[in-house]
Amino acid sequence: DTEVTQTPKHLVMGMTNKKSLKCEQHMGHRAMYWYKQKAKKPPELMFVYSYEKLSINESVPSRFSPECPNSSLLNLHLHALQPEDSALYLCASSQVSSEARRNTEAFFGQGTRLTVV
Amino acid sequence: SQQGEEDPQALSIQEGENATMNCSYKTSINNLQWYRQNSGRGLVHLILIRSNEREKHSGRLRVTLDTSKKSSSLLITASRAADTASYFCATVYNQGGKLIFGQGTELSVKP
């Protein structure tokens, strides 16, 4: 199974809502990532989890709150978002870079298309 | 920013022609990868080239890496309409192990 599954595929939320994005993989990968992608732009790294611990936070606003409850699951909790946060949110997983520095292919989910109204 | 540059930003060719995309990056890398993204969907890994490799092939794909010029190129031979997508290079930098994407090339292959 080389699949990363993201739910939901689409999400529309108001600025006062609280919602969560979910990501799941069963490849035994111990590194998981959240990326944000605006139209016609490259994915921008938000967070990296390594062995279920947050290892990188790319200065993301606190209205985005990541969580890694176990080695297969990654969540992104959303609260009080702004319309400019509308984007495609991508989850990815890979082997932990320090263990396999020469083989860090990342597997991506299909993304959640988020619209903040 | 550690993000590299890609050129061209957009490329339109006819089926059967070859497509070449270039990528430049800024600091020393562990490896360089190419990904493909169909419109509004997830990214698919195409090929990885390590910093000590100069050329790699996979099917109709050929990737080169020149670490002295900090650049890479992706060649797709005998293109097909189904190759229409955005192509991104991504680098794993030696410090931090972060996978950082270049700006991307939007390829359109006309039947």
Image: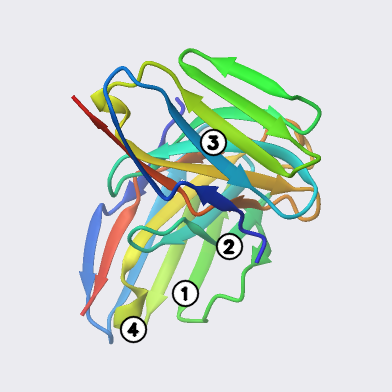
Front tag of 3 and 2: 3
Residue position marked by numbered label 4 in the rendering? A82
Q: Is residue B74 left or right of residue A39?
A: right
Amino acid type, mark 1: Phe
Label 1 close to label 2 by CB (< 8 Å):
yes
Q: Residues within 10 Å of mark 3 (few under 14, many from 20)?
A: many
Front tag of 1 and 4: 4
What is the secondary structure assignment of the residue under circle 2? strand
Distance from Cα at disc 2 to Cα at disc 4: 19 Å
Quarter of the image with the C terminus of chain B is: top left
Residue position marked by numbered label 3 in the rendering? B34
**Residue B55 badge:** none
Amino acid type, mark 4: Gln
Instruction: Return the x and y of residue A69 as percentages of the image width and height.
Output: 54, 56
Residue position marked by numbered label 2 in the rendering? A47
What is the secondary structure assignment of the residue under circle 1? strand
Label 4 close to label 3 by CB (< 8 Å):
no
Residue A116: quarter of image: bottom left
Residue position marked by numbered label 1 in the rendering? A64
Q: Residues within 10 Å of mark 4 (few under 14, many from 20)?
A: some
Label 2 close to label 4 by CB (< 8 Å):
no
Q: Residues within 10 Å of mark 1 (few under 14, many from 20)?
A: some
Distance from Cα at disc 3 to Cα at disc 2: 21 Å
Q: Is residue B99 left or right of residue A36?
A: right
Task: Specify whether disc 1 shares its chain with disc 2.
Answer: yes
